[in-house]
Amino acid sequence: MAMTEQEILEGLGEIIDEVAGVPADQVTPDKTFVDDLDIDSLSMVEIAVAAQDKFGVEIPDDQLKDLKTVQDVINYVRRAEVSA
Amino acid sequence: MGTDRTRVVVTGLGAITPVGTDVPSTWEALKAGRSGVQQLTDDWAAELPARIAAWAAADPATLIDRVQARRLDRCEQFALVAAREAWADAGSPDVDPERLGVVVSSGIGGVASTLAAYDTLKEKGWQRLSPYTVPMLMPNGAAGWLAIELGARAEVHTTVSACASGAEAIGYAMDMIRAGRADVVLAGGTEAAIMQLNIAAFAAMRALCTSRNDDPVSASRPFDKGRDGFVLGEGAGMVILESEEHAAARGAHVYAVVAGVGYSSDAHHIAQPDPEGAGLRLVLRRAMADGGVRPEQVVHVNAHATSTPAGDVVEAQAIAAALGDAAPGVVVSATKSMTGHLLGGAGAVESVAAILALRDRVAPPTINLEDPDDDAGLTISAQPQQLSQRADGPMAVINNSFGFGGANVALAFTEA
């Protein structure tokens, strides 16, 4: 069953807290990973791998680089779930 | 030796060791003769011939930020804990970032991370490797992280010379300041190598104590006739070195002067001491000459003495030969009797101990010394020994560190 935006956001918040130490309540849809959350490219790789485990959605490197905001990831996961 | 050469002083100390979580607790334990050696109860140790080791007194991951702990190998975590203590102890100096350097070493580097990453690779595939795997396993990882931590932009170095690495780092840092390339340098060594592969590999060399698995506290016994190998320890030691001028300008507390460093190469055997001890005599003479220290000024030597049958006696004889007529009365201590052998961390932790011995005028004991195997005429004692001036000039102490590969380093510290 597909997850809601809110469920994905919460899951992403847990991942980002674990990987990068950013409190989950700061992970809101409008935030950019690099400028707002201070997450570097290595940590983005960790986040992508953790997201794969959590959401069952693979994020290839060439897609990952286009995911600039939290909302971008939410949209990507939802689209991938629909097409799966 | 030029008299106008920049003098280098020690203004901060940090350590996390098998006998203490910081410098004060480590130093109290060393003076009290407390051992950090324990039995290894882990399943992976069951088939090993050596089932003892000296774990650090605290898990460094519990002393640092959770996210940082994920990204740092255990040896890097030790380095960070000890470096923060040293930096705070020095009063968190206000220094131009381009005049602040880091020289931090490890004998082996992040070997636990290497092994864990290999398991992950085999079991789950390359995609599941942490993107921090390489900075966790590279030997200069700790130095790099600490340069970031302090914003140190002068230079960042890692001197790798097996068990001499930590001492070589301090010598290199001193040379940087003397050469005018930095005003303040964080220097030290770290190691986290208590794991199946390393114990097996050292056992394969017949380098470890294997006769006292049931009595771990008695296992590391440098200079005692009953010694049969070293005990692996872990942890880190750090010092803040500073030009005397810079330290004076900010009114810093000065522990000691780093008077001199000696280096030499055995060029004899990849992992065994030269029984003639030529390289050891040379390194001691060079350290004293570099520091303008006469043998009569030397009151204490923190020996490399790892508790191996071959190494300890050669070192004692070399100390006696290098000090000559001044050898009787010098107090030699082997703190590895309590901490085990911290490999790349050893020279730095033992330099901290030597500096505090000079400050407190007391040499720590060498525990388990029941039947001394020493006819070199040195004072080696199972009890703490008072240190007192033996000649004109400031009192001096020496730290010896020798590494596989024939790398010898001696550091001479004098009273401020």
Image (cartoon, rainbow, N blue to C red):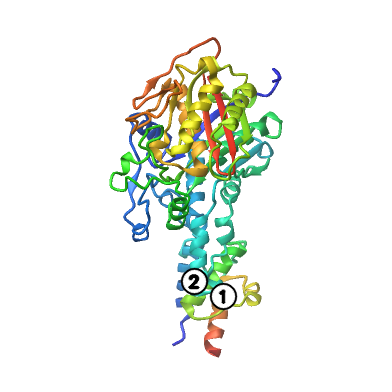
Residue at the (53%, 24%) spot, across then down: B256
Q: CA distance from mark 1 to mark 2?
A: 9 Å
Residue A12: which numbered mark, if any? 2
**Residue closer to the observer: B91 or A78:** B91
Neighbourhood count class around disc 2 (C-alpha, 10 Å): few under 14, some 14–19, many 20 upward: many
In the image, what residue type sits under mark 2?
Answer: Leu
Residue B134 lies, in percent from the top left, at 59, 59
Taking the spot 51% from the left edge, 59% from the top edge, the residue there is: B113
Where B331 sits versus B340, above or below? above
Q: Position of residue B126 (x, y in %)?
A: 56, 72
On screen, residue B48 versus residue B282, left or right, reads left
Q: Check disc 1 and report the residue beneath it.
A: A73
**Mark 1: which secondary structure?**
helix
Residue B241 appears in view:
no
Task: Where is residue B347? Give x, y as percent.
Answer: 52, 37
Seen as rendered, the residue at the extreme top is B392
- In the rendered structure, which amino acid carries the disc numbered 1? Val
Q: Please identify the quadrant where the N terminus of chain B is shown.
A: top right
Q: Give me the chain letter of mark 1.
A: A
C-beta proximity under 8 Å, tags 1 and 2: yes
Both labels 1 and 2 in a single chain: yes
Q: Is residue B2 visible?
A: yes
Q: Is residue B22 above or below residue B248?
A: below
* Quadrant of the rendered image containing residue B212: top left
Counting from the top left corner in percent of width and height, residue A41 is at 62, 64
Question: Is B17 left, or right, of B280 in this rendering?
Answer: left
Chain at numbered mark 2? A
Quarter assignment of residue B188: top right
